[in-house]
């Protein structure tokens, strides 16, 4: 991928912000808690509710949104050399570095290259008019999150994704402190793998009440509790978002409620 970034990048970011109503980042303190699952299904649920959505994969080294959305087509480039993101749904555009490199090849970049790529994804991409732009950030508090917040400025908030277990909560606390140090707002907590329904019994494989502890500690709401479901995991591996391919399930309902809560929290 060409890393040439044309003149006036700050103006391009300003132009982007004029055409996007709300910016939401999805972040976790550690990997493996389902952050991308949340970002993808939040995006599809909002899109199906009628909002115009842009989903940007900011996870340079571990980009997964393409697999979960079921495709790896190359984005086009228009006559002005603007990247045209993939049209996933009528109301959903998506872009990931994995669309531009050979499948399975690692991205071996230091911070400056990642910073330039993120600015290009924002300013040199033809996003159009959007209600929400959702950023799927890598776990932790590294270069990508720092570059995004420095480039885009104030977002409408950051969704913190966690599981109920203590080790995940410890990492989320560090991530929340990072978000606040960057003068960003924590929009709320999403507790993924919150519980699992086995016939008529509800079990809690990773403990119970973790999100509530964080919410009380930091004075932020719990915006969603997503249950575990083996069928949902199979669908994601097949590139089928839960909200589109698991209609009527408890996990689909949980993502729809999350999307509704996020829209209310941002737009009130």
Image (spheres, rainbow, N blue to C red):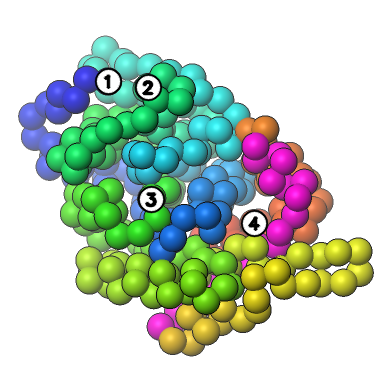
Question: Is-magenta flag for residue 195?
Answer: no
Verify CB contact (< 8 Å) between mark 2 and mark 3.
no
Q: CA distance from mark 4 to mark 3?
A: 19 Å
Among all residues in the image, which is located at the extreme right? Answer: 200
Question: x, y (%) of residue 25?
Answer: 39, 55
| Mark found first going from the N terminus, 2 or 4 | 2
Q: CA distance from mark 1 to mark 2?
A: 8 Å
| Residue highlighted by disc 1 | 1
The quadrant in which residue 125 appears is top left
Q: CA distance from mark 3 to mark 1?
A: 20 Å
Q: Which residues are magenta?
A: 218-237
Question: x, y (%) of residue 208?
Answer: 65, 79
| Mark found first going from the N terminus, 1 or 4 | 1
| Mark found first going from the N terminus, 2 or 3 | 2
Vertical placement of residue 212 versus 119, above or below: below
| Residue highlighted by disc 3 | 137
Question: x, y (%) of residue 133?
Answer: 40, 47
Verify CB contact (< 8 Å) between mark 1 and mark 2.
yes
Q: Which mark is residue 191?
A: none
User: Is residue 171 visible to the viewer in this orientation of the structure?
Assistant: yes
Q: CA distance from mark 2 to mark 3?
A: 19 Å
| Residue highlighted by disc 2 | 101
The quadrant in which residue 79 appears is top left
Callout 2 secondary element: loop
Q: Which mark is residue 255?
A: 4
Quarter in which the N terminus is drawn: top left
Vertical placement of residue 192 versus 94, above or below: below
Q: Badge 1, how many Cα within 10 Å: few under 14, some, many 20+?
A: few
Foreground: disc 2 or disc 3: 2
Foreground: disc 1 or disc 4: 1
């Amino acid at each position: 991928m060409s890393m040439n970034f044309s003149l006036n990048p700050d103006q391009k970011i300003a132009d982007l912000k004029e055409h996007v109503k709300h910016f939401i980042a999805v972040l976790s303190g550690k990997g493996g808690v389902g952050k991308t699952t949340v970002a993808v299904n939040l995006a599809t649920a909002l899109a199906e509710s009628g909002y115009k959505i842009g989903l940007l994969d900011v996870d340079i080294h571990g980009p997964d949104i393409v697999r979960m959305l079921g495709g790896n087509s190359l984005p086009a480039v228009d006559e002005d050399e603007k990247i045209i993101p993939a049209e996933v749904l009528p109301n959903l555009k998506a872009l990931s570095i994995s669309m531009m490199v050979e499948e399975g090849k690692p991205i071996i970049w230091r911070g400056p290259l990642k910073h330039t790529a993120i600015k290009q994804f924002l300013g040199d991409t033809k996003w159009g008019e959007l209600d929400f732009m959702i950023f799927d950030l890598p776990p932790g508090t590294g270069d990508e999150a720092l570059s995004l917040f420095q480039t885009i400025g104030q977002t409408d908030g950051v969704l913190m994704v966690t599981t109920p277990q203590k080790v995940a909560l410890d990492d989320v606390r560090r991530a929340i402190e990072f978000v606040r140090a960057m003068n960003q707002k924590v929009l709320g907590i999403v507790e993924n793998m919150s519980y699992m329904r086995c016939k008529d019994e509800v079990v809690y494989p990773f403990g119970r009440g973790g999100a509530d502890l964080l919410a009380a500690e930091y004075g932020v709401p719990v915006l969603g509790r997503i249950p575990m479901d083996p069928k949902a995991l199979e669908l994601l591996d097949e590139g089928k978002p839960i909200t589109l391919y698991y209609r009527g399930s408890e996990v689909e309902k949980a993502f729809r409620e999350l999307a509704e809560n996020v829209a209310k929290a941002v737009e009130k």
